[in-house]
Image (cartoon, grey):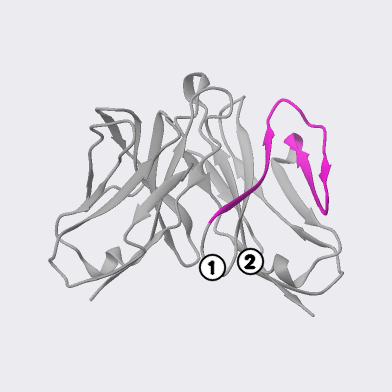
Amino acid sequence: NAGVTQTPKFQVLKTGQSMTLQCAQDMNHEYMSWYRQDPGMGLRLIHYSVGAGITDQGEVPNGYNVSRSTTEDFPLRLLSAAPSQTSVYFCASSYSGRWGGFAFFGQGTRLTVV
Amino acid sequence: AQKVTQAQTEISVVEKEDVTLDCVYETRDTTYYLFWYKQPPSGELVFLIRRNSFDEQNEISGRYSWNFQKSTSSFNFTITASQVVDSAVYFCALSDWAGGTSYGKLTFGQGTILTVHP
């Protein structure tokens, strides 16, 4: 059981480049989400999904796109990378019901935009 | 809007000291869930404890204990007899509980850097 898998672990982009951060979970969780972590600001929610085909914006969605075609995968797309998107990105999944807030996190992707 | 505040930016202790990490939260929900996560230097997020809003019994799990006070909206976390391996960033988090489920959305505090010296 791999849990939540994020790829890549590290990435350097040039300003204006695009890329997709991959996230996959094998726990059959309904809910998946993306957070970014910046120094002194904790983790902030970018986008989340409550099931295949259903996504919604979180606190800091600008500059990011998501889609959820399957239960397992929830990729995060940066269409035109900016230095302000330099951050550590975490994908999480959780199940519905009483403890639906209990999130399982991936290992994180450290992204640098130069 | 929900908010979580961890006023302690950094704490430094000597091994075997007890240390308490403070967390204050704001929410309009009557039912909610609170969590503590640990982020060691390796960077992953490790779940530590969780508490629901309708059970104020405080518990102890090994060297960890927590004090949930609904009246003051606080959810403090204590490590007893700290060890060097406890050095990490600790995050308090609050789940959004609209409509009977959280949709997996968490609001995090800013984090507290704990350094335990030998």
Q: Earlier in the sequence, mark 2 or mark 1?
A: 1
Sort mark 2 into few (<14), some (14-19) or many (20+) by Cα contacts within 10 Å: some
Report the chain holding disc 2.
Answer: B
Q: Which residue is the site of mark 1?
A: B42
* B64 is within the stretch colored magenta: yes
The residue where tag 2 is placed is B88
Instruction: Indicate the position of residue A15 as horizontal and vertical percent values.
Output: 16, 70
Viewer-proximal residue among B48 and A5: A5
Count of numbered circles on the image: 2
In-image side of A82 versus B102 (left or right): left
Q: Are marks 2 and 1 on the same chain?
A: yes
Residue B20 is tagged as none
Quarter of the image where the C terminus of chain B is located: bottom right
Chain of residue at mark 1: B
Specify the farthest residue to the top.
B99
At x 75%, y 35%, the residue is: B71
Graded by Cα atoms within 10 Å as few (under 14), some (14 to 19) or many (20 or more), the crowding at tag 1 reads: few
Residue B6, above or below B57: below
Q: Which residue is nearer to you in this view: A48 or A61?
A: A48
Query: Percent x, y for residue B85?
Result: 71, 68
Would you say residue B70 sits in the magenta stretch?
Answer: yes
Quarter location, residue B55 = top right
Q: Quadrant of residue B90?
A: bottom right
Q: Is residue A24 left or right of residue B95?
A: left
Magenta stretch: give its range: B45-71
Q: Secondary structure at mark 2?
A: strand
Q: Amino acid at mark 2?
A: Ala
Q: Is residue A66 above or below residue A7?
A: above
Distance between mark 2 and mark 1 Cα atoms: 9 Å
Amino acid type of the residue tagged 1 in the rendering: Ser
